[in-house]
Image (spheres, rainbow, N blue to C red):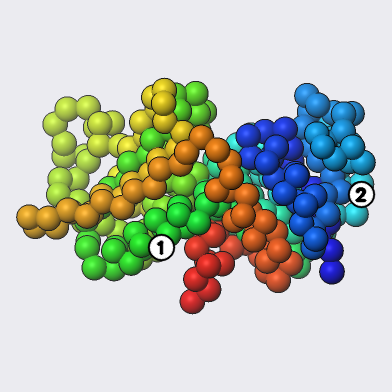
Amino acid sequence: MTIRICVAGATGWVGEALCPAIAAAGDLRLVGAVARKAAGRPVPGIPEVAISGSIAEALKAPTDVLIDYTHPSAVKANTLAAIAAGAGVVIGTSGLSAEDYAELDAAARKKGVGVIAAGNFSLTAALLLRFSLMAAEHVPQWEVMDYASFTKPDVPSGTARELAERLGEVRKPKIGVPVEKLHGPKETRGAEIAGSRVHSMRLPSYVIAVETIFGAESERLTIRHDAGTSPAPYVAGTLLAARKVGDVKGLVRGLDRLLFPD
């Protein structure tokens, strides 16, 4: 069966690579695309698909899966609109909170559709998450470092937020000195997300990098993922999710849960 896909953020960094990959796949078909500034134009290289200016307009075409790579301010509303239309959703956009995900999960379960969200759809980022969860079962102290371009508007990155929240499902890390007992600016200890201290750095030359630093007596373990300047690593993982989301009811977070279903 051919899966009909709409891409929101079709002219963005990942969206531009996703659209031709969908068109080239034998089991997928691009039926819609959304990009406000390019509305009315054909998708580059796919002249039979016109770009819509809104999700509502794009979803007038029968759609099985919406893939969203838009903006933190738009992704939640886009996802709810797709769920209401009976479409599954693959969320590659960062910036959603745990509360947002809970709301989307409830809406998807009520409608009987699936949502797959990941802070990062690359295989190696999924392995970073998997290995960090394994380490957290044995080492009780860690912190998360988040690196990105100085123009990235959301903090932390979706990769780092998902990592911290998933680590919190394993256990809360031990803290040497509680933040409220520190001397000096408490902000220097980073933000607390699901119990983990998370530090976001924003500088030129970074794309996305995340590391989990585990500390034990007289030793440390650092697990790090660095993204390059190409969107190619995210395409395969996103299309894997698009193929799997029809089998899901409710929300699944993390590409690692598709790679390691146990």
Pointer 1 residue? 130
- Give residue 121's position: percent from left, percent from top: 55, 52
The quarter holding residue 105 reads: bottom right
Element under label 2? loop
Relative to 28, is 41 above or below? above
Residue under numbered circle 2: 61
Asked whether residue 174 is in view, the answer is yes
In primary-sequence order, the first of circles 1 and 2 is 2
Residue at x 70% of width, y 59% of height: 242
Amino acid beneath label 2 = Ala
In the shown orientation, is residue 50 left or right of residue 213? right
Q: Is residue 108 above or below residue 7?
A: below
Q: Which residue occupies 89% across, 41% down?
A: 49
Q: Amino acid at mark 1?
A: Arg
Can residue 85 be seen here? no
Q: Is residue 244 above or below residue 25?
A: below
Which is more toward the observer, 176 or 44?
Answer: 44
- Give coordinates of residue 60: x percent, y percent: 92, 46
Mark drawn on residue 36: none
Residue 227 at what x, y percent from top left? 46, 41
